[in-house]
Amino acid sequence: MIEKIKQKLPWKPVEIADTESIPKGDMPGDKVNIGPQLIQKATVIFPKLLELLIPVLDESPYQRAVVVVCGGSGVGKSGIASLISYYLKNLGLGSYTLSGDNYPHRIPKYNDAERLRVFRKSGIDGLISDGQYTEERLTILKDLQESGNDSNKDFINRYPWLAVYQTAGRNGLKNYLGTTNEIDFKELTGIISRFKNGESRIFLKRMGREETELWYDLVDFSDKNVIIIEWTHGNNHNLQGVDIPILLNSTPRETLEHRRSRNRDGATDSSFTTMVLEIEQDMLISQAPNAKLILSKSGEILSYDDFVRLMIQEQV
């Protein structure tokens, strides 16, 4: 089969008449819009991906591989993953697009609550250990928490001790976000292992936004050669078995604007959400050396050094 694929190279972009008909990922309720910009980016990525993918499939006893499309929210992970899957199918390679957002330990509203709890508990611990915790400050802090401003840097001028609270809270949050405390990497790694070892039917997790919206679907992989995982944390070292990580560049500002437009979680413009996005962005940058392909937001393939320079420029 791989030899037949090689005969179709070099790959030429496929005209897409109806993007709505393209199968999307498996995150319940997620809306994926595929516009001209994403199509342009996917056509840049796909030939480079094929160069990396064909040798992996050649070496696999079951002609199977796992690709990850990672990056911040709003950078186009879901759309580009769907397009890659579509292009693979047109070449004769079966593929499945899997959303990593189905694999936190907690449903979204509980995970959001746990993130906030970790931040606030760590912040108070920091005040105590620094000798800054008093009953008077507790009252002020309670008011700031109730108004959602305890993570707002603008209040540090009024309450200098808040800097200790925010720094300690941020450090605590960094030890939760994208770690095994937040995400069930073991379950997703197990799915990757079973797929690459030739299993034809695998149960995949589905996670909605309420307590009762948690279930599993039995998915048929008998005709699939590639799993494409679209996920912010897809390049995390805790996720094992990925063959080709693709990193899509984004900034916290772009991510925040996208979250506002989707209005999935409420309070998306809060200072706390901004902090979460900044921490996730730092994680993506630290994991970037492991990416096999990096694409800029303007649609150019970047070397790692180019990526670092670009991110520094955007932070100035």
Image (tube, rainbow, N blue to C red):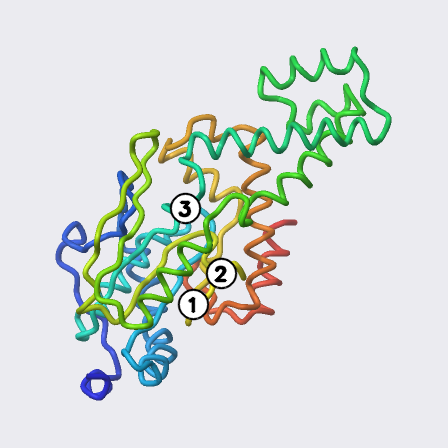
| Amino acid bearing label 3 | Gly
Does residue 1 lie above or below 267 as drawn?
below
Q: In this figure, which residue is indicated by the disc labeled 1?
A: 242
Callout 3: few (<14), some (14-19), or many (20+) C-alpha neighbours within 10 Å? many
Disc with the residue nearer the chain's start (1 vs 3): 3
Taking the spot 40% from the left edge, 35% from the top edge, the residue there is 107
Classify 10 Å Cα crowding around label 1: few (below 14), some (14-19), many (20 and above): many
Q: Amino acid at mark 1?
A: Val
- Badge 1 vs badge 2, beta-carbon distance below 8 Å: yes
Closer to the camera, 133 or 146?
133
Is the N terminus in the top left, top right, bottom left or bottom right quadrant?
Answer: bottom left
Q: Is residue 64 above or below residue 297?
A: below
Mark 2, Cα crowd under 10 Å, few <14 / some 14-19 / many 20+, is many
Of the residues tagged 3 and 2, which is closer to the observer? Answer: 2
What number is the disc on residue 135?
none
User: Which residue occupies 28% across, 60% down?
Assistant: 39
> Which residue is the site of mark 2?
235
Q: Which residue is mark 3?
A: 74
- Toward the viewer: 84 or 26? 26
Asked if residue 14 lies left or right of residue 127, the reply is left
Callout 1: helix, strand or loop?
loop
Amino acid carrying label 2: it is Asn
